[in-house]
Image (spheres, rainbow, N blue to C red):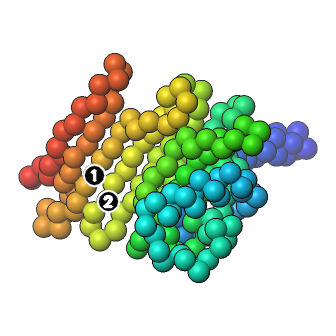
């Protein structure tokens, strides 16, 4: 009886460990779970980008208060800062920009960004040793999904699907772009199938 309980406990711990290694999700409107101090070089780059993009809604907020970050693992040896807005003034509707920065000593390099997303998932699937990224957004019957993979020094798009909901036929219409094994991007239209 004790052996059976020990084996059950062992399997439970193993299951918990496997779940801990699964994908991580970061919602645009959710606070990060484990905040990290953002290096000043990242704050400087993002402040410059906001000024360049002409975002004026955050004028009264200090640059250090505009963002929040969490360290995320992208490979066995690579951690990066996932940075997202800490204030809604940088967002539109339910979508916000997000950025990934790889930091070496004092230099921060932008390796991925999106201007607007509802959810970023750091997938448990890897390509070239790095986790794939999946970002999605959906609101009012339309949305998009994009998957990114590591390509030498940054992330590149390997799949993109933009869709709208056809309420009458209760299905999605849209354009889907997929990267083939040879690197070629192929686009096709997704249409509803009539019954």
* Residue on which the image places disc 2: 143
| Residue with the mark numbered 1 | 162
Q: Is residue 16 above or below residue 63?
A: above
Which sits in the foreground, 135 or 64? 64
Residue 28's x, y, as percent? 52, 64
Residue beneath the point at 70% across and 31% down: 76
Mark sitting earlier along the chain (1/2)? 2
Q: Can residue 102 be seen from the camera position used here? A: yes
Judge left or right: residue 156 versus residue 43. Answer: left
Helix, strand or loop for disc 2? strand
Residue farthest to the right? 2
Foreground residue, 43 or 51?
A: 51
Q: Secondary structure at mark 1?
A: strand
Q: Are marks 1 and 2 in contact (CB under 8 Å)?
A: yes
* Vertical order, 94 against 98 (above or below): below
Q: Is residue 123 visible?
A: no
Compute the Cα span from label 1 to label 2: 6 Å
Q: For the N terminus, give its image quadrant.
A: top right
Residue 88 is left or right of residue 179, and the answer is right
Closest to the observer, 188 or 8 = 188
């Amino acid at each position: 009886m004790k052996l059976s309980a020990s084996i059950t406990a062992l399997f439970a711990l193993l299951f918990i460990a496997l779940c801990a290694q699964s994908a991580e999700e970061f919602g645009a409107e959710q606070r990060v779970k484990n905040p990290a101090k953002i290096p000043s070089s990242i704050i400087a780059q993002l402040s410059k980008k906001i000024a360049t993009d002409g975002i004026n809604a955050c004028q009264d907020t200090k640059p250090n208060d505009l963002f929040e970050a969490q360290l995320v693992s992208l490979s066995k040896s690579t951690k990066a800062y996932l940075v997202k807005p800490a204030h809604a003034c940088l967002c539109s509707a339910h979508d916000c920009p997000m950025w990934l920065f790889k930091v070496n000593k004092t230099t921060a390099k932008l390796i991925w960004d999106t201007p607007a997303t509802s959810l970023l998932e750091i997938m448990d699937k890897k390509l070239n040793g790095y986790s794939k990224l999946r970002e999605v957004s959906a609101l009012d019957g339309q949305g998009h999904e994009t998957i990114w993979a590591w390509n030498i020094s940054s992330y590149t798009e390997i799949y993109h699907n933009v869709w709208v909901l056809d309420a009458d036929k209760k299905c999605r219409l849209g354009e889907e772009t997929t990267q083939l094994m040879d690197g070629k991007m192929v686009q096709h239209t997704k249409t509803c199938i009539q019954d």
